[in-house]
Amino acid sequence: MNTRTSIASLLARSVCAACLSVMAFGAAEAQPVRGLYVAGAAGASFNQSQTVNPHTKLFPRGRDDYTTGITGLGSIGWGLGDGFRVEVEGNYRNNRLSRFHSPGFSSSAHGHQQKYGGMANALFDMDIGQNWIYPYFGAGIGYGSQFTNTAIRGTGPNRGYRQRTRDSAGGFAYQGIFGVSLPVPWVVGLSTTMEYRFYTITGRHRHFTTATYNFSNPENDPVSGKRGSRTDFNHSLMLGLRYEFNPAPPPPTPAQTLSSTPAPSPVRTYLVFFDWNRDSLSDRARAIVETAARNSTSAQFTRIQVNGHSDSSAVRPGSREAEAYNMSLSLRRARTIKAELIRDGVPAGVIDVHGFGDTRPLVSTQPGTAEPQNRRVEIDFQ
């Protein structure tokens, strides 16, 4: 394996590991894709050189070089509503063989290599505060099949050598995915996508090959054996479309908020209360959040502030540990409300969450007091 190939392999593994690590910590800033969706993409396929190491000494060793080819894929998936989504994918790649490079062995080459694969992917969509673009990344594993149909002819002193490979080999495949989606404003649920993918079929790929090796007698009976290749690393750049069947409703436009008779202004602040030391929602709390989400379509606002609070009760009231715990608990409560608002159709990009611990009580109490009205989250339209 040459230096360039080994670096590319190491980089790909590192990128995939980094993706999974970031996915574990980024769920709070997700742009949700909810429910069923389908996607398709097509673009350019770039094969790195593949190292050739035959099982028989009658075939020359070297490196297969490929030209830029084509790639395409289709997928069907399910969005979990919190930024994460999973999908199954079928893909295809095709690159033409440009030359066989072997020191001391001059030759010409032609043919192509096709790849077919089935993958299971996990992806995460990010909300960066802009409703027109959403970056995403992910990784996938599956099975890939490599079909090689190539011919090599010796030139110069090797004239008379003929080699033919036409065989398939397959194995475990994995990929890293980086892209952005751009919602199409006039078709709710439709987005265009731009992607980069690193894809590889691991291991050594053995293809049945025949060759006439006797330069002085081209009519000599051919020899046959397995021609092994590895370092199958592919890079793809693609454009595509994704359609969600259950998209989150878009925020109201100014035209939707105008009417001939002014409507009564909806309530702009909602209070949601929590049980002691809990960040889960009761049925009553869910109903309040649902009402706030429904009224958000008729209220004029630019942001929704979700502020979490706790009471002052703790094992050691006034200690740093108690302050830190109450601050963490208040932030968890605020994030729970944000997730519920998103499930009820509010776009994630308009919601800001904050935690204030026990620093802003609704009812003034002595330190260490368990006061139900202070265990709350305030939903404030601004």
Image (spheres, rainbow, N blue to C red):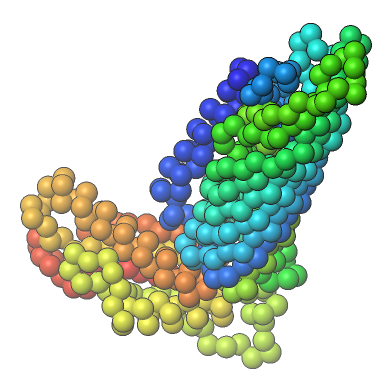
Dividing the picture into quarters, in which one does residue 320 lie?
A: top left
Residue in the image at 12% along x and 47% along y: 319
Dividing the picture into quarters, in which one does residue 217 lie?
A: top right
Between residue 23 and residue 13, name the one nearer to us. 13
- Where is residue 200 shown, x and y percent of the image? 61, 38
- Where is residue 292 shown, x and y percent of the image? 44, 78
Residue in the image at 63% along x and 18% along y: 2
Can residue 97 be seen here? The reply is no
On the rendered structure, is 150 left or right of 340? right
Dividing the picture into quarters, in which one does residue 187 lie?
A: bottom right
- Where is residue 233 shown, x and y percent of the image? 65, 33
Give the vertical position of 119 relative to 372 (above or below): above
Give the vertical position of 10 relative to 239 (above or below): above
Residue in the image at 86% along x and 22% along y: 220
Can residue 289 be seen here? The reply is yes
On the rendered structure, is 246 left or right of 159? left
On the rendered structure, is 111 left or right of 182? right
Between residue 354 and residue 112, name the one nearer to us. 112
Give the vertical position of 374 relative to 149 (above or below): below
Give the vertical position of 224 relative to 248 (above or below): above
Between residue 214 and residue 171, name the one nearer to us. 214
Residue in the image at 47% along x and 38% along y: 17
- Where is residue 23 shown, x and y percent of the image? 46, 48
Between residue 337 and residue 13, name the one nearer to us. 13
Query: How many numbered discs sit on the rendered protein?
Result: 0
Q: Quadrant of the N terminus?
A: top right
